[in-house]
Image (cartoon, grey):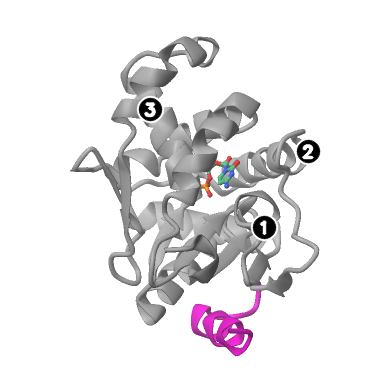
Amino acid sequence: MNNQTIPVITIDGPSGAGKGTIAQMLALDLKWNILDSGALYRTLAYFMLQQNIKLKDFEENMLFIKSNFKVKFDPGTIGEPVKVIFNNDDITKKVRTEDIAKKTSDLATDPLIREFIRPCQRDFMVQPGLVADGRDMGTVIFNDAKLKIFLTASIEERAKRRQSQLKRQGSEVNMRLLLQELEERDKKDTEREHSPLIPAEDSVVIDTSNLNPEGVVKEIKTYL
Ligand code: DC
């Protein structure tokens, strides 16, 4: 099957803009596959930590990592995070911690890591279609996608959403600390040399600060 015939919707934006929820709702609604590329990076960080492989030793361990890096996503149910299945193990909770987020942010600035992850991401493009959530889905990985969405929201709103998400998972995080971490992550994501977080020229930008998820999905579907 020619990849060109497989429809892709890319959803990019900073942490907490609502990408995960919107991508999940769209994937469930359209019955398409889902790629949570942030979780793919997180899983790599988790695996390297588990195997005690430092970033500087990535290249020499690349073959081992490649042959063991089998990740699947299940959109799951609304209100729950997209499920991350790694080597048949549900590691959703393990990769969605702030500690892994921090480590992942460092890892994601490395060009070798991005190059390694690129074909893994393209592999998710299978029939009947793909909703791809991340930072460079529309600009780099699926720059040929038919519909590109860039979600934004104020940093305060994003921190609030992150806090309630973490609360649902059983962790209490101080708001000031969350704001600070979000700022740091935004800076790293937007200022990095390789695949910085920017809206694709041909993307539709939606500010979700004052919209509910259903409203955002409805707006996106008008562009389909
Ligand atoms: O969306 P998230 O918080 O799960 O992403 C985790 C980290 O991975 C975040 O620091 C940004 C990075 N990332 C990236 O560089 N490129 C992507 N396509 C997705 C995530």
Q: Which residue is mark 1?
A: 143
Q: Residues within 10 Å of mark 1 (few under 14, many from 20)?
A: some
Q: Residue 72 in the image: state x and y as whole percent.
A: 31, 49
- Is residue 220 shown left or right of residue 204? left
Where is residue 128, by image quadrant? bottom left
Q: Which residue is mark 2?
A: 191
Q: Secondary structure at mark 1?
A: loop
- Is residue 146 shown left or right of residue 130? right
In the rendering, which numbered label is found on residue 66?
A: 3
Q: Residues within 10 Å of mark 3 (few under 14, many from 20)?
A: few
The numbered mark, 3 or 2, whose residue comes first in the sequence reads 3
Q: Secondary structure at mark 2?
A: helix
Residue 217 colored in magenta in the image: yes
| Viewport quadrant of the N terminus | bottom left
Q: Amino acid at mark 3?
A: Lys
User: Does ligand 1 reach within 8 Å of label 3's beta carbon?
Assistant: no
Q: Secondary structure at mark 3?
A: helix
Where is residue 107, by image quadrant? top right
* Magenta part of the chain: 209-224
Q: CA distance from mark 2 to mark 1?
A: 20 Å
How many labels sit on residues?
3
- Is residue 84 shown left or right of residue 204? left
Q: Would you say residue 110 is visible in this rendering?
A: no
Q: Amino acid at mark 1?
A: Asn
- Is residue 201 shown left or right of residue 15? right
Q: Nearer the viewer, mark 3 or mark 2?
A: 3
The numbered mark, 1 or 3, whose residue comes first in the sequence reads 3
Up-down relation of residue 216 to residue 104 (above or below): below
Choose between 220 and 207: the one closer to the eye.
220
Q: Are marks 2 and 1 in contact (CB under 8 Å)?
A: no
Chief SS of the magenta region = helix
Q: Residue at x 50, y 37 (%)?
A: 117
